[in-house]
Image: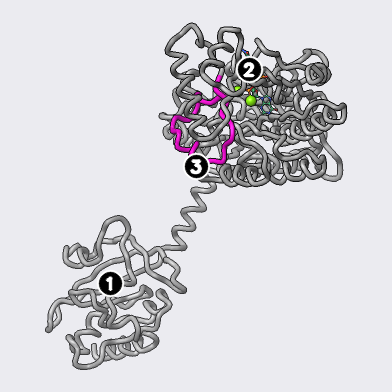
Amino acid sequence: MENRRTSASEQLKGGGAVLPRGSALSDVDRLEAVVATVSGDAQFLVDGDGTVLVCNPAASSLTGVPGATIVGSNVASRIGLDGDQDLGDLLCSGRIGDVASGWVVGVEGRSEPVEVVVGRHHAMEGTVYVLSVRSVRDRLLREAELVRRATHDPLTGLPNRSLLLQHLELAIGRSSRVELGPAILFLDLDRFKRINDSLGHNAGDELLVSVARRLESCSRPGDLVARIGGDEFVVLCDGLTSAQAVGRMARRIVHSLDEPFTAGSIDVRLSTSVGVAMADRSTGAEGASDLLAQADEAMYRAKENGGGRFAFYDREISDQAIQKLHLEAELERGISNGELVLHYQPIYEVTGGQLTGVEALVRWQHPHRGLVQPLEFIPVAEDTGMIFALGEWVLEEACRQLLAWDRSGSRPIVMSVNLSPRQLVEADIPATVGRLLSTSGVSADRLQLEITEDVMLESSGPALVALNELRQIGVGIAIDDFGTGYSSLSYLRDLPVTVLKLDRCFIEGLGTDPQASSVVAAMISLAHSFGLTAVAEGVETRTQLQALRFLDCDLAQGFFLQRPKPPDDIVELLRT
Ligand code: C2E
Ligand code: MG
Ligand code: MG
């Protein structure tokens, strides 16, 4: 017995520590308690308050702190229990021998997962506890590796069908409140078997790994790419906001897999069919497996149609999305082929009848479809970011035209150009405008930019900064379609606006609907009280024009006065 005590005492000295003589327990009691539990585990002998009285060398290695520092400190500052368990409660509860899971503040502050077992000893001076603490990091890593093997494809390292279904189920659950839930893109490589048979299985495997990497590189952060069968992959996308965005993703995948791969030393071309299903309420898919089955079905349709393409599960969505994507591709081509043109709608003084300016309105001179109106392609340009190139072209062309009219000896007029909210927020419009004005020599007060009220929602952000810079340059700022958007008018006070363009829907009832007249009257006086010019949009009748004259509106534009016209027709009007 005596020998055992001595050897335990020596063990403690090898890196562990004890409280100095005179503290609550006698050495004998301390060693008694420790000896009883000497093992490879870290040991902390603590009193009822959790103060460490003794610890062994393993405790020091586990925490990375010298024993002398541990002793005297409270054990709760180093060991925590998982969940809402409390170490103090564990000591008091008397659940001696229970294994609790927790963590230790380990070497360099790293959290070390551990198991804690409490032993209790009745010493002369009171009850003491021995906490035996064992790191479970290696065990957890082994378990995690087993889970990984069960949920991942060994060849590509991608999640397998089971993990995909788990993630999909979660994503569907999360999406119960949003209109468009997760989308899945089910891919099957076209004629892969033939490639496998002709090049051999090793090359086939190499190709599948390359496909996996390429899919990962064209997916977004947060998307899940899974391999669910021989040459079948699934991309799970969450958070896409429209069928069009999903279609764009599918197109990107089809195109990306269209690029040649290398297997061994030869170039191989693959093509892929993609079936798309969305957990949209209208498709009525119940769960993850249903959705997967829908995407599978759509994939077969893509294959039947020749492969190397995608198809939506829902035919109607498929047709619309494909049409929109077609329009996108066409517009991109149209812009670079110089198919955009500007028409100009004259703006007149209401009282004097003088032509004071024009609004530039973009059209797309499509080689087969004729003149396409902006409402059909501006939203597409905004969605895809083509609006930046388009908008810059419009600004440039409008300035060029203004100079051309000036050179022909026409009366100077103001040119109004529409800006999309994205342009104002994301493109450096002040720089573009500044550059255009200085290279063309057009004076700033001849240019007016029209923005819609939506931009005002961001009245404190980059839009406001850009507007202020534009105002400093000296160009006019008009609020377009006024009255149809954001309801708070406080922005009129805060923003550097010069013109209000009253939306056509208010002008419509003028002269026939008394309420319309009072609304328009209020808008005009609002504009005047802020020192702004009031412009009526969409004047279609003489009665409306007369009413505007009576209400003291400054300017007007509309089909009754002139429709938007090609530049040559405007020259005629400027001469008269
Ligand atoms: P907006 O800026 O409010 O332009 C006025 C629209 O009303 C024009 O349609 C014009 O043709 C139409 N309009 C003018 N007078 C009348 C009328 O008396 N009756 C009726 N029913 N309509 C009239 P448009 O050219 O189809 O343009 C539609 C919208 O497309 C524009 O509305 C503007 O928001 C946008 N847009 C046009 N060109 C551009 C551009 O270059 N850039 C940007 N970002 N948007 C543009
Ligand atoms: Mg406009
Ligand atoms: Mg308008």
Span colored in magenta: 481-503
- Crowd rating for badge 2 (residues with CA inside 10 Å; few <14, some 14–19, many 20+): some
Would you name the residue on which mark 3 appears? 494
User: What is the CA distance from the residue labelled 1 to the residue labelled 2?
Assistant: 67 Å
Q: Is residue 493 magenta?
A: yes
Camera-side residue of 200 and 109: 109
User: What is the CA distance from the residue labelled 2 to the residue labelled 3?
Assistant: 42 Å
In this rendering, does residue 232 appear at all? no
Which residue lies most toward the front here?
Answer: 352
Point out the frontmost of discs 1 and 2: 2
Res 320 label: 2
Question: Under tag 2, what secondary structure?
Answer: helix
User: What is the CA distance from the residue labelled 1 to the residue labelled 3?
Assistant: 66 Å
Position of residue 5 measured from the top left corner of the image (x, y, whole percent) = 27, 88
Residue at the (53%, 41%) spot, across then down: 495
Mark 2 residue type = Gln
In the image, 124: left or right of 178?
left
Residue at the (79%, 28%) spot, across then down: 335
In this rendering, does residue 19 appear at all? yes
Q: Is residue 264 magenta?
A: no
Image position of 5 with respect to 132: above or below? below
Question: Which of the image's four quarters has the C terminus?
Answer: top right
Image position of 224 with respect to 56: above or below? above
Camera-side residue of 555 and 79: 555
Residue at the (78%, 33%) spot, across then down: 399
Instruction: Give whichever of discs 1 and 2 has the lower sequence position.
Output: 1
